[in-house]
């Protein structure tokens, strides 16, 4: 059976009742998506995160959205869209009295280290666009598993998935416009829990880099001071407890 077409529920917001992946719909070639267009659902059956990991939640408990961004920046700054997105979400959540912070490179955690949102950005060079996928737990929280999940409802925030993605869309567009006007990584460091932490970076080749996260590089890399200062572009980061 063919999948239903997304329907417009607000300017730039297209809703689908169920889909394997909003990211696949947003990056597909069936429709040319404009800057700021969002595909969203509260029932994603095969969501994915970094390194092809899956992201699954019970239907109706989370908001899954993919936003198309066509920022007028140099290609090397496209990688910053993940951190710009995470920073915008944290700023919003803090307005709602949710104690959130960014864990480099792509997670939003609460004060207990539970994941509230995960972010996946895909660069589409042929269309000079980046599609940012965001999964946010609205009511689903789970204390088991490798990555513990928290939810906005744990902090008294009750919001529908459709209202969430509509508000998130505008905040992300505004955040991208501010970054384009002044592409500076320093403001992004202010919402990051990783900076100043002793961390272990698990590299794609399996090697570990251990040291203190000192800040961000000019394109969003993580600077770790150990035996030497190393610039990390891709890794799983573990926040280590103080000795």
Image (cartoon, rainbow, N blue to C red):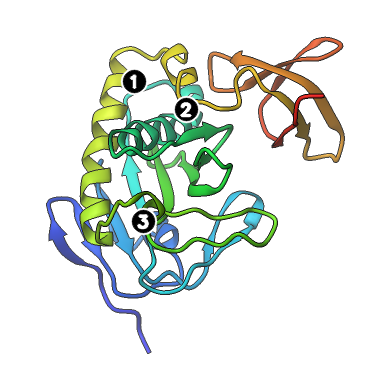
Q: Is residue 236 left or right of residue 85?
A: right
Image location of residue 153, percent across then percent down:
36, 56
Alpha carbon separation for disc pair 1 and 3: 30 Å
> In this orientation, which residue lies closer to the viewer: 153 or 179?
153
> Helix, strand, or loop for circle 2?
helix
> In this orientation, which residue lies closer to the viewer: 209 or 102?
102
Disc 2 to disc 1: CB gap under 8 Å? yes
225 relative to 137, above or below: above
Residue bearing mark 1: 179
Q: Residues within 10 Å of mark 3 (few under 14, many from 20)?
A: some
The numbered dot on residue 153 is 3
Q: Is residue 100 left or right of residue 113?
A: left
Q: Residue at x 51, y 23 (%)?
A: 76
> Helix, strand, or loop for circle 3?
helix
Residue bearing mark 2: 80
- For marks 1 and 3 on the same chain, the one whose residue lies earlier in the sequence: 3
Q: Is residue 104 left or right of residue 230?
A: left
Q: Residues within 10 Å of mark 1 (few under 14, many from 20)?
A: some
109 relative to 161, above or below: above
């Amino acid at each position: 059976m063919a999948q239903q077409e997304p329907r417009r529920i607000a300017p730039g917001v297209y809703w689908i009742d169920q889909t394997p992946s909003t990211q696949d719909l947003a990056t597909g070639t069936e429709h040319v998506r404009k800057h700021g267009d969002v595909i969203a659902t509260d029932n994603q059956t095969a969501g994915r995160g970094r390194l092809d990991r899956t992201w699954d939640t019970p239907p109706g408990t989370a908001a899954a959205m993919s936003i198309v961004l066509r920022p007028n920046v140099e290609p090397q700054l496209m990688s910053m869209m993940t951190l710009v997105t995470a920073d915008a979400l944290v700023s919003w959540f803090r307005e709602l009295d949710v104690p959130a912070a960014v864990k480099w490179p792509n997670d939003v955690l609460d004060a207990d280290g539970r994941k509230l949102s995960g972010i996946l950005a895909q660069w589409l060079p042929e269309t000079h666009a980046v599609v940012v996928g965001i999964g946010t737990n609205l009511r689903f929280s789970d204390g088991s598993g490798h990555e513990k999940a928290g939810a906005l409802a744990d902090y008294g925030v009750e919001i529908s998935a459709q209202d969430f993605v509509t508000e998130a869309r505008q905040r992300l567009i505004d955040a991208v416009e501010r970054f384009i006007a002044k592409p500076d990584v320093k403001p992004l460091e202010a919402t990051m829990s990783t900076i100043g932490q002793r961390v272990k970076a698990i590299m794609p080749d399996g090697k570990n880099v251990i040291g203190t996260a000192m800040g961000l590089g000019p394109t969003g890399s993580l600077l770790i001071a150990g035996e030497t200062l190393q610039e990390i572009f891709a890794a799983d980061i573990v926040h280590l407890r103080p000795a």
